[in-house]
Image (cartoon, rainbow, N blue to C red):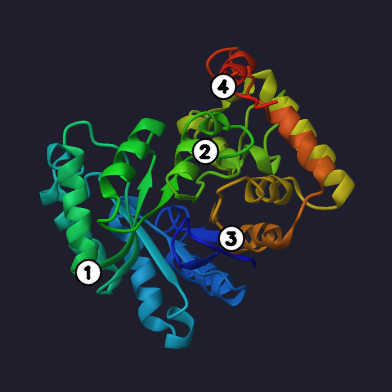
């Protein structure tokens, strides 16, 4: 495992985080605890959860693991959770209001049996609540000692810039959690530059694109069996019908397969190592159903791809934006030479 600063903060975190969205649904408590044990044994430090994961069950499972392990193990963990969506409250009461976040944070602390969260993240932008109200609550949460650092999740570039500007000198806003992988590089157009400019470390979720980048799916046959898309082919942003129609998907998978064959690593390990190499990435979030999947994915924590392999993957996964504003014409327009 490697260790990095979390954004511009003084906190050191492992370059791979353990995501717990599967805990309580796709992974039993026994399997979840076994994943946490393995992750801690391998030097991992970031436990990434959210109140909405399994309607609170994920946080409860994490809490019981924290309570049942020795302090030498748990003291090294960097605990990150999120609030914004309805958990035990009507949907109209969710969001980033002071009222909802106060209740959400207190409930998260209770479920995990702790009095403090290392990183508290707002799970998505709220178009109803004034951003100043949200930031006012987050400032209070830090000052009160319930939270050490604050992060954003699923914000757009302009939203990141606005939040970071208003938070300056009030509390440590240190991270941004976006979807980011070889099949989802559009975040590089605005979200990644905004995060870098504001000193936020990236915590990418879905680094394997819902299993696509692990080489699970084929072009000529819809997925079946005990995989996420086998059980639900229309699942979320990685839905099979939509993604399989895009020729870029198969171009990326071919490139990943080529690098995997040449290096002797799996497609998943190659895809994770590529993401780990990207600018501003502090820690890649691994979300696994089984201990075996986690053990295999953790190999990538110490894998460094060659410049040649990275260039091949970059070229194959280029989302090819239109000429302006994100393509060649826009880049040229925004550049300036002093020669």
Please state if 315 lies on the left or on the right of 209 as rendered. right
Distance of label 2 from label 1 (alpha carbons): 33 Å
Label 2 element class: helix
Mark 4 near mark 1, Cβ–Cβ under 8 Å?
no
Above or below residue 150? Residue 210 is: above
Above or below residue 232? Residue 71 is: below
Numbered mark located on residue 15 in the image: 3
Distance of label 3 from label 4 (alpha carbons): 33 Å
The mark lying in front, picked from 2 and 3, is: 3
Q: Which residue is mark 2?
A: 231
The tag earlier along the polypeptide, 3 or 1, is 3
The mark lying in front, picked from 4 and 1, is: 1
Q: Residues within 10 Å of mark 3 (few under 14, many from 20)?
A: many
Mark 3 near mark 1, Cβ–Cβ under 8 Å?
no
Label 1 element class: helix
Distance of label 4 from label 1 (alpha carbons): 41 Å
Label 3 element class: loop
Q: Is residue 107 visible?
A: no
The tag earlier along the polypeptide, 2 or 1, is 1
Numbered mark located on residue 290 in the image: none
């Amino acid at each position: 495992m490697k260790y990095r600063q979390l954004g511009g903060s003084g906190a050191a975190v492992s370059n791979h985080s353990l995501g717990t969205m599967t805990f309580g649904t796709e992974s039993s408590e026994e399997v979840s605890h076994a994943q946490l044990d393995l992750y801690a044994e391998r030097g991992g430090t970031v436990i990434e959860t959210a109140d909405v994961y399994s309607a609170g069950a994920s946080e409860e499972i994490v809490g019981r693991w924290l309570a049942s392990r020795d302090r030498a193990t748990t003291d090294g963990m960097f605990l990150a959770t999120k609030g914004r969506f309805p958990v035990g409250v009507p949907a109209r009461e969710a969001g980033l209001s002071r009222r909802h976040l106060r209740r959400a944070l207190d409930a998260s602390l209770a479920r995990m049996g702790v009095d403090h969260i290392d990183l508290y993240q707002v799970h998505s932008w709220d178009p109803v609540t004034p951003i100043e109200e949200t930031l006012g609550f987050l400032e209070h949460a830090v000052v009160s000692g319930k939270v050490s650092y604050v992060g954003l999740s699923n914000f757009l570039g302009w939203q990141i810039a606005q939040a970071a500007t208003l938070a300056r000198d009030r509390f440590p806003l240190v991270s941004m959690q976006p979807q980011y992988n070889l099949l989802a590089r559009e975040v590089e157009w605005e979200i990644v530059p905004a995060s870098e400019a504001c000193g936020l470390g990236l915590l990418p979720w879905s680094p394997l694109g819902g299993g696509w980048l692990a080489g699970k799916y084929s072009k000529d046959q819809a997925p079946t069996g005990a995989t996420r898309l086998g059980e639900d082919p229309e699942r979320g942003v990685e839905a099979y019908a939509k993604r399989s129609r895009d020729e870029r998907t198969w171009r990326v998978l071919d490139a990943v397969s080529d690098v995997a064959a040449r290096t002797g690593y799996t497609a998943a390990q190659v895809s994770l190592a590529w993401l780990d190499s990207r600018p501003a990435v502090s820690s890649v979030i691994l979300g696994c159903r089984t201990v075996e999947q986690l053990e295999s994915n953790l190999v990538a924590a110490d894998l460094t791809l060659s410049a040649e392999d990275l260039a091949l993957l970059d070229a194959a996964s280029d989302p090819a934006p239109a000429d302006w504003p994100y393509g060649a014409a826009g880049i040229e327009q925004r550049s300036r030479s002093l020669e």
